Amino acid sequence: MPVAKWLSDKVGRIAWIDGWMKVIAKWNPMLILFIIFLLNMGFGLSNRPWFHHSLLSLDLVAILSAVLGRLLNHPISHWISRKRPFEEQYMRSLLDHDPGESFPSNHATGAFALVIPFIFVPGYALVLLVLAILLAFSRIYCGLHYVSDVWAGALTGMGLSFIGLFVLSLLTSTTIMQ
């Protein structure tokens, strides 16, 4: 638990960092969804009208990946039954959170599942990836997850999104050829 120990020494020392981490951990998923909404409204895509019809497919991949990730995480969480860091007294929690299973992180799964389908959208990829990474880090910083929890969640979300993109490419290529 060297990362957890290092973070537990940092938490509570700099109030503005603690404040930002709490805001990110709690509200970042809504910010990611808002940015995806702006993308779907065409914000920043005015010179790429051909791209608008592809967004619905990417939205579908993102949503299905996030939902499937949550469904996949549920039995794994119960099977592994790992307590959260604040329950193990490695860290104090900066956010009110119920005790329970922490592995894998549903927030990290959802964030990366939602972000990955849009990584090839110019102007949006970097912003969305940074937000997903910040969300994952903030969940660790706030004492809600271990590093391995967010790694597992991020890999699950990314994996499901890449599978979804692959299936989408197969479906669209066969439709075009017929």
Image (tube, rainbow, N blue to C red):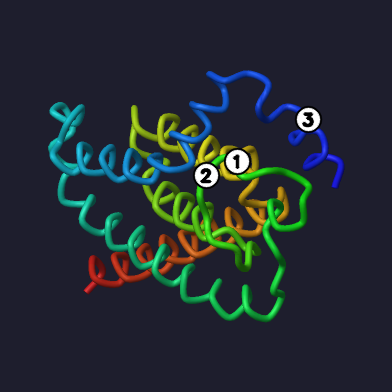
Looking at the picture, tell me which residue is in the foreground, 91 or 149.
91
- Residue neighbourhood size for the residue with mark 3, other residues' Cα within 10 Å, grouped as few (<14), some (14–19), many (≥20): few
Looking at the picture, tell me which residue is in the foreground, 168 or 23.
23
* Position in image of residue 159 (x %, y %): 55, 61
Q: Which mark is residue 33?
A: none
* Position in image of residue 136 (x %, y %): 57, 44
Q: Which mark is residue 142?
A: 1
Between disc 1 and disc 3, whose residue precedes? 3
Using the image, determine if residue 14 lies above or below residue 95.
Answer: above
Element on which disc 2 rests: loop
Callout 1–callout 2 Cβ contact below 8 Å:
yes
- The residue at which mark 3 appears reads as 9
Between disc 1 and disc 2, whose residue precedes? 2
- The amino acid sitting under disc 3 is Asp
Q: Which mark is residue 95?
A: 2
Element on which disc 1 rests: loop
* Position in image of residue 154 (x %, y %): 58, 53
Specify whether 99 is left or right of 51.
right
Specify whether 170 is left or right of 143.
left
Q: CA distance from mark 1 to mark 3?
A: 12 Å
- The amino acid sitting under disc 2 is Leu
Q: CA distance from mark 1 to mark 2?
A: 7 Å
